[in-house]
Image: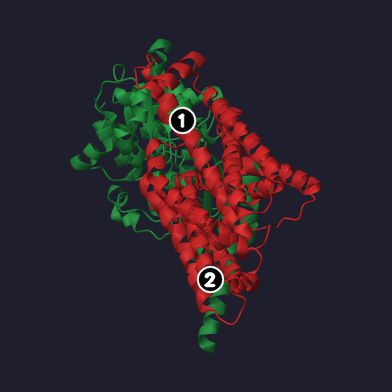
Amino acid sequence: MVDRVRRQLLAAAAAAAIAPIVRAQARELVDDAGRRVTVPAQSARIFAAGPPASVLVFAVAPDKLLGWTTPFRDAERPFVDAKYADLPTLGRLTGRGNTANVEVVLAAKPDLVVDYGSVTATFASLADRVQSQTGIPYVLLDGSFDRMAASIRVVGRLAGLDATAEGVARYAEETVAEVTRRVAAIPATSRPRVYYARGPNGLETGLAGSINVESLERVGAVNVAAELGRGGLVRVSLEQVLGWDPQVIVTTDPNFELAVRSDPLWQAVSAVRKGRVHLAPAVPFGWIDFPPSLNRLIGLRWLARVLYPDAFPEDLRSAVREFYGRFYHRVPDEAQLEMLLASARARS
Amino acid sequence: MIRRSGLAAAIVLVVLLLAVAAAFTVGRYPVALGDLLRLAWSSLTGGPSGVAPTVETVILGVRGPRVLAALAVGGALAAAGGAYQSLFRNPLVSPDLLGVSAGAAVGAVLGIFLSQTVVVIQLAAFAGGLLAVGLVYTVARLVRGHDPLLVLVLSGVVIGSLLGAVIALLKYLADPYNQLPAITFWLLGSLASIAPPDLAATLPAFAVGLILLWLARWRINVLAQGDEEARALGVNTGRVRAVVVVGATLVTASAVSISGIVGWIGLLVPHFARFLVGPDFSRLLPVSMVLGAAFLLCVDTIARTVARIEIPLGVLTAFVGTPLFLWQLAVARRSWL
């Protein structure tokens, strides 16, 4: 007993002696919130603070990701390699409520915490608190669409995987650029008016500028709810939806997508009558809005295909294969592809 | 007294009819008054209306059911609140005293948490409300040696807060991106998604509950004088209480299952009704219902028209209800029983 304690003390002393050397290799980085953070020269154990950061770190440095914020559901698991899907669930550290126990986080021995998303003062101060409490460098990266490639490169530099990250970042830039370029050629009159339906009733929607409809806005869609103003996720009435009479409905709720086809009231909506209700794939990560991370890239291509079938006639299979292989490290098989892309084809 | 009650009832009815007419004419989908009248005429005569099918859907499928649901939910909550206030001889009592709203909320939140369909969520809410009150009632029956009324209220409070903790736990575990917003919207209450099947499904429970309360109206009056007096007059207090609890629970659980949590009505409206017609439950019940129906209809009409997005009912009833309640408190001199 005494021996063990002595050994541990010695080990601690040794660690303390080595610490300055490690610190000598460390360098300083200014994160997207303007915080100066001293980070290790090459991080080996990264804790992703929230779901968006998990997807980011998983895409760039999967072998350095310590765990997930929530466990994978049965439907999501087959799309991620077992080696990664079986990583422990450690919880969220910041953002919309903590579920992570700080001691559990420390027990996982991270040398870096990465958070990806909003970089407002609230999140910067949360990052400062966690960093000073745990002594682990906490880097906050900007999760907006425009900063996506930049954030990928930063994670690559932090993990010492610059070359991999460069490839991922290029892919992200090219995807956004290509979709933007081709959408720009579509005249305003050919752009359908889209209603984005969330929730079991399909009566939750995103206002202009909300993170929910960022992808829709990226592909130049006309969000019918934009006339209500700017904001976040809100509730509207069916009467309002009938008034808008959208030509396309994009939804994230499978129950709603199923119910709307037989619901007599929704038949008054053009999109429903014409079979243009599209359920966005959600495995292993959502394609449209949540989590707001790199997973939205493939959603851009999907949305373009769904909204402008004439301008984007190509089959999405190869794009999905490439994206899943590169970002989730597992290429889906034919049955999985079929399942993912079933809703992209218009039903009539 | 009788004359005053009659006048009050007539005024309240006229207000209700005006509110219904107003509710039909406004909404986010523009409908011409002529189309509305043509539709009303064809609904009465059964002939073809000649209006655009979408307009017909808006009025008969969306706005109409929503107006009816506002009337039903408002009336039901006010009736249940009035019954409980008389039964428990306490003006601070609302229909969720015995945990029906908390139980319904647990059911609905669980349904959302498990990604169920709307029908299952509504059924779970209804069942949750009944189960919660059943549990409260059973616990109260098992505890002996205290004032039965006090034990019933206490076990309602205790189990209600336990269910509140269950809701909090489910919210904590829910997927923050998809389920949490749906749960929050449900807990705030709304009639935005009412469709005809919701009305058809809840109507039987509304009817049974209200009939029970109506049949018990004289005994409720006797019970409101106190248990001792009621027993002296030969009333089986335990049985009457059970009937009232079952009736009030049925109507409240059905209301909450389609509207989500809508507070204030069950507490506020019976006070106004009592102010108008006095404490006699045989008058209080119908007047409460009509007032509650009119109140919720007005609030819901505001909720769906005044802002560009839907305003949650639970928020609006509190904002409208608090000043009304304080005003009524200031002017009412009448004793409440």
Q: Colour of chain B?
A: red
Judge whether B273 appears above or below B149 on screen: above
User: Which residue is denoted by mark 1 in the rendering?
Assistant: B64
Disc 1 marks a residue whose amino acid type is: Gly
Judge whether B147 appears above or below A147 on screen: below
Chain holding disc 1:
B
Chain holding disc 2:
B
Q: Is residue A120 visible?
A: yes
| First in residue order: circle 2 vs circle 1 | 1
Q: CA distance from mark 2 to mark 1?
A: 42 Å
Farthest residue to the bottom: give it.
Answer: A2
Disc 2 marks a residue whose amino acid type is: Asn
x then y, percent, for residue B46: 35, 22
Residue A84: mark in rendering: none
User: Which residue is denoted by mark 2 in the rendering?
Assistant: B236
In front here: B33 or A124? B33
Q: Which chain is green?
A: A
